[in-house]
């Protein structure tokens, strides 16, 4: 599914509460801008049985006590399945469109970033997208949306 269809899917699945679809429409360029920096349209993440995303806590060897909470996004279902096998039966891989992953990450309190592995079979190098970067860009588009004059209905 290309990025435009991914955004349309997000908007179509938004609750029809009178504002969420319009807000999604407003922040869509931010999600697309970040997604275009990545190599794949879909990644697989690990999800627990209660459908929460598997968060990995990374420790900094040079700064004991400093931790980072990340989610890994795998370029193929097979890569995610291999990682899930290491976790036993507690997690399972779930393929998701990249824009949906980026959108969901802003709702995950305490999450620092998502590491998108770009090369199948290689989990040594990834592209880290900090949650704050996504949040800041979305806030920029939200400010523009909120400051835009209301549509002229007359």
Image (spheres, rainbow, N blue to C red):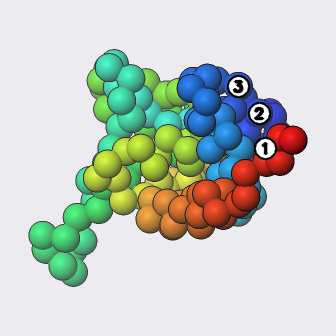
Q: Nearer the viewer's eye, disc 3 or disc 1?
A: 3
Residue beneath the point at 24% across and 71% down: 60
Separation of disc 3 and disc 2 at Cα? Answer: 6 Å
Q: Which mark is residue 8?
A: 2
Q: Position of residue 44 (x, y in %)?
A: 56, 36
Q: Residue at x 38, y 23 (%)?
A: 51
Residue highlighted by disc 3: 12
Q: Residue at x 59, y 63 (%)?
A: 143
Whether residue 111 is visible, yes or no, is yes
Please state, as top left, top right, bottom left or bottom right, where the N terminus lies in the image: top right
Give yes or no for contact between labels 3 and 2 (Cβ–Cβ under 8 Å): yes
The quarter holding residue 154 reads: top right
Q: What secondary structure is marked by label 3?
A: helix
- What SS does tag 2 mark? helix
Callout 3 touching callout 1 (CB < 8 Å): no
Q: Crowding near pointer 2: few (<14 within 10 Å), some, many (20+)?
A: some
Residue 128 in sight from this viewpoint: no
Query: How far is mark 1 from mark 2, CA to CA?
Result: 9 Å
Residue 47 location (% of width, % of height) = 41, 29
Instruction: Give the farthest residue toward the bottom.
Output: 62
Q: Is residue 150 left or right of residue 153?
A: left
Q: Residue at x 61, y 23 (%)?
A: 16
Image position of 140 with respect to 150: above or below:
below
Tag 2 or tag 1, which sits nearer the N-term?
1
71 sits left or right of 151 in the view: left
* N-terminal-most mark, 3 or 1: 1
Q: Is residue 36 left or right of residue 96?
A: right
* Image coords of residue 66 (percent x, y): 19, 70
The residues bearing labels 3 and 1 have C-alpha atoms spaced at a distance of: 14 Å
Kind of element beneath mark 1:
helix
In this figure, which residue is indicated by the disc labeled 1? 3
């Amino acid at each position: 599914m290309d990025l435009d269809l991914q955004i349309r899917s997000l908007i179509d699945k938004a609750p029809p509460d009178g504002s969420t679809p319009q807000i999604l429409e407003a922040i869509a360029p931010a999600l697309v801008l970040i997604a275009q920096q990545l190599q794949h349209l879909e990644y697989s993440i690990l999800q627990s049985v209660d459908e929460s995303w598997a968060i990995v806590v990374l420790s900094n060897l040079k700064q004991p006590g400093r931790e980072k909470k990340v989610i890994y996004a795998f370029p193929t279902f097979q890569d995610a399945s291999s990682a899930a096998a290491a976790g036993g039966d507690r997690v399972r891989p779930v393929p998701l469109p990249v824009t949906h992953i980026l959108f969901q990450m802003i709702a995950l309190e305490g999450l620092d970033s998502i590491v998108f592995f770009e090369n199948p079979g290689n989990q040594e190098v990834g592209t880290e997208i900090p949650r704050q970067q996504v949040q800041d860009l979305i806030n920029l588009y939200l400010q523009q949306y909120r400051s835009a004059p209301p549509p002229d209905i007359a």
